[in-house]
Image: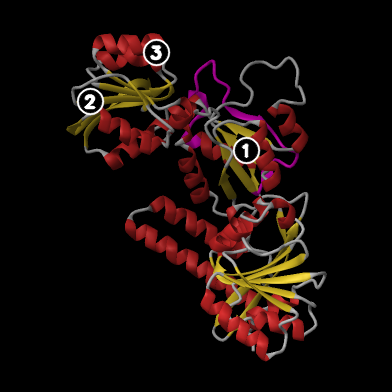
Amino acid sequence: MIDNRLKKAAEFVSGRGVACDVGTDHAHLAVYLISGGRCREVIASDIGKGPLSAAAKTVSEHGLSDKISLVLSDGLENVPLDRVSDIIIAGMGGETITDIIRRTDEHHRNNIRWILQPMTKPEILRRELYKMGLRLIKEEIVEDGRKMYTVMCAEFSADTPLLTETEAYAGMYSCENSPGREYRAAEIARLRKIAAGLSISGDHSGSTHYNALALRLEKGSQPTDITAICRFFDSLYPFSTQEKWDNSGLLAENESMSCRKILLTLDITCESISEAERKGAELMISHHPVIFQPLKNIRRSTPVFRLIRSGIAALCMHTNLDIANNGTNGVILDKLRERLSIKETLPFENCGGGRYLGYIADLQEAISPDDLGALLKDIFGCAYVRASHRRENISRIAFCSGSGGSMLELALENGCDAYITGDVKHDVWIDAANRGIALFDCGHFHTENIVLPELKRILEKEFPLLDVEIAESSSDPVRYI
């Protein structure tokens, strides 16, 4: 009556109370649960009247109308959950299943065993379950005909960690049996196919990521010496080139001085450290130094205290990253090149040794200030772009990441029509207006956070067995009302 994937789902039912089969179709699973003694009562729900009519016929044929209730419902919206102990959602996409669970009120969600069989995107489902505090207690791969399916069982846990992308793809199933091995091999092949397609389309960064992800699924994440990571970054963004007032480098060590997981973030904050803790990261890499001024004390509320207590190392790359060819400003230049026809680039402030703080770009075709502002908003992902008033089109652009308002005069000396930076003060706006240059403030955070995907790319290329994540908590600290 039911296939192997639904039989496995039935095995996971606890039998503690009422089970609910979401998207029941013909109610075959509900009948199987009652007939097999897995539970005494089942609610079978479906979003469509047609499937529910078919389910009613099945229930009637088996004489189980007193034990199986039929509910017309979008997800769990109309399902009474007070006595429900188990919910089975099978045959839907991982994102749809995630949405159904997320729309369930937290009280019921945390007191239910979730038995899930996604047809697509199981990695998204796994990751989102853990964000909601639901931990996988079982996961098995079942074979049905020529197809392989994963069946998951999740329950609430007060100490649920966060999954990295690698862990979300790996799942909790065993690879020691034949179905698990075949399923894992198929996932690896799928990721490599994605990588190949991205390479052909010119997305080499995406290709690097999926190849590294496939390799980690095949071999597992491997510990790497933190000093080797420091040496690698020093070869690209020499720490000796940082400004005298800066404090870039390895600012905190961990006990083993090795890591399997790295969390990238613009700033090491208490929130980002919490994320690192929940993901099990042993090293955090940030743009802004977590220790900048001399410390006279280390209070419990500070990130430095949290790093030491959690045994997490911290590597910070600030001005040495800003001035490197492929550093912060180099990434901005690449993003502008993707969207604008640039005929020539020049260094904005030449720092020597082939390193520049910002660039000047001459455009093939002039662009209006409004169009440039909209483009910058899209490139940097800003909530808004602050812009000065100017009517004339723009042909020469200067830009500098971070807080570069003091360099407006340099942009004027170089005959620029526009200057792009962040953290612009009032007097700089007035100066720009008086002297007729378009000024765009895209925010300190947004003009620097843009470098994190490049750091992730080069780490995955050099150390593909490292599990590298960009912190979800690396977000604009300012809220706009």
- Residue at left offset 75%, top offset 82%: 34
Q: In terms of sequence position, does the residue under pointer 1 or pointer 3 come before the other?
A: 1
> Is residue 242 magenta-colored?
yes
Kindly tell me whether residue 221 is visible in this rendering.
Answer: no
Q: Nearer the viewer, residue 426 or 314?
A: 426
Circle 2 residue: 396
Of labels 1 and 3, the one closer to you: 3
The part of the chain drawn in magenta is 235-260
Secondary structure of residue under mark 2: strand
Q: Secondary structure at mark 1?
A: strand
The kind of residue on which mark 3 rests is Ser
Gap in angstroms between the C-alphas marked 1 and 3: 31 Å
Badge 3 is on which residue? 406
Q: In the rendered image of this protein, does residue 93 appear above or below residue 330?
A: below
Q: CA distance from mark 1 to mark 2?
A: 38 Å
Identity, as a three-letter code, of the amino acid under mark 1: Met
Residue 284 marker: 1
The crowding category of the residue bearing disc 3, from other C-alpha atoms within 10 Å (few below 14, some 14 to 19, many at least 20), is: few
Amino acid type at mark 2: Arg
The image quadrant of residue 58 is bottom right
* Circles 2, 3 touching at the beta carbon (< 8 Å): no
In the image, which is nearer the foreground, mark 1 or mark 2? 2
Q: Is residue 338 left or right of residue 391?
A: right
Residue 316 location in percent, x, y? 58, 30
Q: Residue 477: give x, y in percent of width and height.
A: 55, 29
